[in-house]
Amino acid sequence: MPHPGRGREPGEKSPQLQLLCRVAGVQVRIEQTALPGIGIRYDFTTQKGRRIGVVAHRSGRRDLVIYDVEDPDSCVAQLALDDEEATALAELLGASLMVSQLAGLREEAAGLLTEKVTLTADSPYAGRPLGDAKVRSRTTASIVAVFRNGNAIISPGPDFVFTAGDVVVGVGTRDGLDAMTRIFAEG
């Protein structure tokens, strides 16, 4: 299978930008390549030497591509994702990364805890935005995620509206997390 989004004459190079990102303490080099008339391709190489990429089409479609180990200009698998599928995959990867990072933080920081609180229908914050609770300023705990219907909402903003059944994930001290739980129960 040819390289996705190739469309160049032999020997012609596309403009390329290299970005260095630090994820979970590991530096990752992401190459960004403009694909005229198509969109942008983002590639990186895993620690085990596998090359993976995403082609972000101008239409909004995204293709997840896995390159051949022997020939990095050839891909062995390509999976087209629509907006909803790309968002679901990003949330899935982000949620699992966040959980492992939080587990690592527990080991590193004595006294730093995580806690899940299920928002009940009679909570004063069911149907209200996160910002109304002012959890961070009132408790020193931080809300890092909300799980709703099996989906993770990572780092919800102040406009995020809670619904009954949401599972709120907080990070903080024991006192801060106890205060957060009281806020969601009593106001």
Image (cartoon, rainbow, N blue to C red):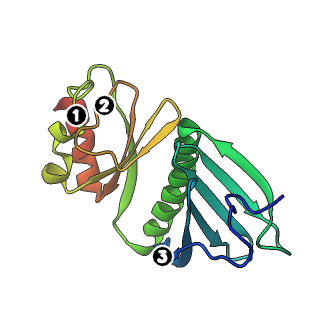
What separation in Å lies between label 3 and label 1 (alpha carbons)?
A: 35 Å
Secondary structure under tag 3 reads strand
Q: Is residue 96 above or below residue 86?
A: below
Left or right of 97 in this view: 112: left
Badge 2: residue crowd in 10 Å (few <14, some 14–19, many ≥20)? some
Q: Are marks 2 and 3 in contact (CB under 8 Å)?
A: no
Which mark lies nearer to you, 2 or 3? Answer: 3
Kindly identify which residue carries mark 3: 19
* Residue drawn where x is 23% and y is 53% of the image: 176
Q: Earlier in the sequence, mark 3 or mark 1?
A: 3
x, y percentage for residue 19? 48, 76
Three-letter amino acid code at the position of disc 3: Leu
Secondary structure under tag 1 reads loop
* Residue drawn where x is 20% and y is 57% of the image: 140
What separation in Å lies between label 2 and label 1 (alpha carbons)?
A: 6 Å
* Residue drawn where x is 19% and y is 52% of the image: 136
Q: Is residue 71 above or below residue 150?
A: below
Q: Earlier in the sequence, mark 2 or mark 3?
A: 3
x, y percentage for residue 130? 24, 39
For the residue pair 135 and 59, the one nearer the viewer reads as 59
Three-letter amino acid code at the position of disc 2: Phe
Kindly identify which residue carries mark 2: 162
Badge 3: residue crowd in 10 Å (few <14, some 14–19, many ≥20)? few
Kindly identify which residue carries mark 1: 129
Quarter of the image where the N terminus is located: bottom right
